[in-house]
């Protein structure tokens, strides 16, 4: 079950800078750990996170094995217009989760 | 040993344990022993990874399951009605004739009322539901039930807490009653109050139950851990909750 | 790869060849417990991939990370850059590198004037005590940097001996 959490204001004044906080369920297995049987546990990470605002990219993050399990990422964006923020996490083994959040801008 | 001798031995033990207990004014959650950055992680729901389990718990609460096709909400209504429940577990269960913890209570609901299979200990589903229920008691004081049927199990838990065991020949009390606040390597020894369970432990990179933490302690003492669900764990939890009575719950807590 | 690591590899190769199958199996379980870690040279090379021959200026960047953490599995980090974040003058990217994880990369964040504020936070993994370097790439092509040292301690009682 994919599981992601977006926390950001539901409404904002035009031009206001808002913080977007994101959490997603993922083991972020580094590929450098050894299992109990002595063999390396294969890498399984999210390597890219993207946020678009009404279709325009406003934030992109290239992630590595150095990002913690259940990644928390937060960033800022200007509330330009009412619409939808779209989030996408892509990673190893075909991992892909998409989420959206709406904002009303007055 | 005669019956009265056993009675007096138990009485003496209970008295000894009571005197060693940390006074209420000096009780301190492990929250206060950790760095401000981990405290901040716990305090902000949007950054606390335990919130991911709450999300799943919320979904499970409303999902109809088992042969009875019932959801938790069908019997219990809104989850807010669960406020205070986690603060009074473990509680005596007449069906099992002994105390059960919150996870076991959830599984009894599944097998008896939902006619569904019990969730495995430490499974994502069980931790999610137990975190979601425990979250409703955040900031509420731990209030162990005044149920006389619990007395022998409380005494058994106190005995386990104070008994030396394992290859290191240590008791729980030697660290957590006698030496809390001091350092074990770089870590501060906490008072071991179960205020934040289930907790997101950075070491585990996951949410986990108090039973998992107790297993962790037993391995640290080089004692053989009990199997998940063992009555010993519930007895210790019963004693720990009694020892922490009055302290506010903080589930899902974050710990290093 | 540093010379110490090369020595290990050579010795493992030699022992696996000359020892019994049992000795070989034992080595395979023991040696991977210390995987290679990035070195300051590897971090410098990774930074050069981003910065090229441009000058790396100290300033403008604030790297906010606790100086001492009880566990390196999730360390809160915030990188902020002083910038008006206008179309003419903004931060294009924020890059973070580390010195002692198995790889020198932490993250590369790409932003622009739509961000309003050049600030990115994440929980990161630090395998051991080390130095972190944050670099901001500005719209005028300049690079600015800040670094921080973090001490990572480990718990006295860990769950499994295999960790």
Image (cartoon, rainbow, N blue to C red):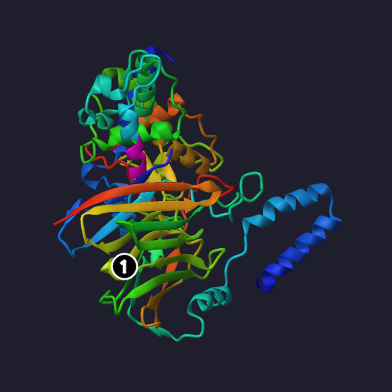
**Left or right: B188 in relation to C130:** left
- Up-down relation of residue C41 to residue B78 (above or below): below
Query: Can the viewer see residue C143?
Result: yes
Disc 1 crowd, CA 10 A, few/some/many (<14, 14-19, 20+): many
According to the picture, the residue beneath numbered tag 1 turns out to be: C119
The residue under the point 57% across, 52% down is A43
**Displayed quadrant of residue C73:** bottom left
Residue B4, compared with residue B19, is above or below; it is: above
Q: Nearer the viewer, residue A103 or B161?
A: A103
| Front position in the image: C62 or B210 | C62
Residue C163 in the image: state x and y as whole percent.
Answer: 56, 50
Q: Is residue C155 magenta?
A: no
Task: Please tell me which residue lies in front, B4 or B189.
Answer: B189
Residue at the spot 46% in from the left edge and 41% down from the top edge: B217
Q: Nearer the viewer, residue B119 or A99?
A: A99
Q: Secondary structure at mark 1?
A: strand
Residue drawn 31% across the image and 29% down it:
B61
Residue B52 located within the stretch drawn in magenta: yes
Residue C142 in the image, given as x and y percentages of width and height:
39, 83
Q: Is residue C104 above or below residue C145?
A: above
The residue at the point 51 percent across, 81 percent down is C52
Where is the C terminus of chain A found, in terms of image quarters? bottom left
Image location of residue B186, percent across then percent down? 44, 59
Q: Is residue B45 visible?
A: no
Across and down, in percent, residue B68 comes to 36, 14
Quadrant where the N terminus of chain A sits is top left
Magenta extent: B49-56
**What residue occupies the far front of the structure in this picture?**
A55
């Amino acid at each position: 079950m994919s599981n992601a959490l977006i926390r950001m204001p539901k409404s904002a004044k035009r031009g206001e800078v808002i913080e977007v906080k994101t959490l997603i369920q993922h083991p972020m297995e580094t590929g450098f750990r050894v299992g109990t049987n002595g063999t390396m546990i294969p890498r399984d990470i999210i390597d890219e996170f993207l946020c678009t605002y009404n279709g325009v990219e406003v934030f992109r993050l290239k992630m590595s094995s150095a990002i913690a399990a259940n990644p928390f990422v937060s960033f800022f964006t200007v509330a330009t217009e009412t619409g939808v923020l779209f989030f996408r996490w892509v990673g190893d083994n075909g991992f892909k989760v998409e989420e959206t959040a709406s904002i009303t801008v007055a | 040993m005669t019956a009265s001798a056993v009675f007096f031995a138990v009485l003496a033990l209970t008295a000894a344990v009571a005197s060693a207990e940390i006074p209420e004014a000096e009780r301190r959650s492990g929250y206060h022993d950790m760095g401000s950055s981990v405290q901040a992680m716990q305090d902000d729901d949007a950054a606390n990874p335990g919130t991911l389990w709450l999300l799943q718990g919320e979904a499970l609460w409303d999902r109809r399951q088992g042969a009875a096709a019932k959801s938790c909400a069908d019997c219990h209504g809104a989850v807010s009605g669960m406020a205070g429940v986690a603060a009074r577990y473990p509680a005596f269960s007449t069906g099992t004739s002994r105390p059960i913890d919150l996870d076991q209570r959830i599984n009894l609901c599944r097998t008896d009322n939902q006619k569904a299979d019990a969730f495995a200990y430490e499974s994502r589903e069980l931790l999610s539901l137990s975190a979601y229920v425990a979250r409703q008691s955040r900031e509420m004081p731990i209030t162990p039930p005044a149920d006389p049927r619990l007395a022998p199990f409380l005494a058994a838990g106190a005995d386990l807490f104070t008994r030396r065991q394992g290859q290191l020949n240590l008791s729980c009390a030697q660290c957590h009653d006698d030496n809390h606040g001091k350092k074990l390597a770089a870590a501060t020894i906490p008072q071991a109050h179960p205020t934040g369970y289930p907790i997101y432990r950075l070491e585990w990179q996951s949410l986990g139950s108090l039973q998992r933490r107790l297993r962790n302690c037993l391995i640290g003492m080089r004692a053989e851990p009990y199997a998940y669900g063992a009555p010993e764990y519930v007895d210790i939890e019963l004693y720990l909750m009694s020892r922490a009575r009055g302290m506010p719950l903080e589930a899902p807590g974050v710990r290093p | 790869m540093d010379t110490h690591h090369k020595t290990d590899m050579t010795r493992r190769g030699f022992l696996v060849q000359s020892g019994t199958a049992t000795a070989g199996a034992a080595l395979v379980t023991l040696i991977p417990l210390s995987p290679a870690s990035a070195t300051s040279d590897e971090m410098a090379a990774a930074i050069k991939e981003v910065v090229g021959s441009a000058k790396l200026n100290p300033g403008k960047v604030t790297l906010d990370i606790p100086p001492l953490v009880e566990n390196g599995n999730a360390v809160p980090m915030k990188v902020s850059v002083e910038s008006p974040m206008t179309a003419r003058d903004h931060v294009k990217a924020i890059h973070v590198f580390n010195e002692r994880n198995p790889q020198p990369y932490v993250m590369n964040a790409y932003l622009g004037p739509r961000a309003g504020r050049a600030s990115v936070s994440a929980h990161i993994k630090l395998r051991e005590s080390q130095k972190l370097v944050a670099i901001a790439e500005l719209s005028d092509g300049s690079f600015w940097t800040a670094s921080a040292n973090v001490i990572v301690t480990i718990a006295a009682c860990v769950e499994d001996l295999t960790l």
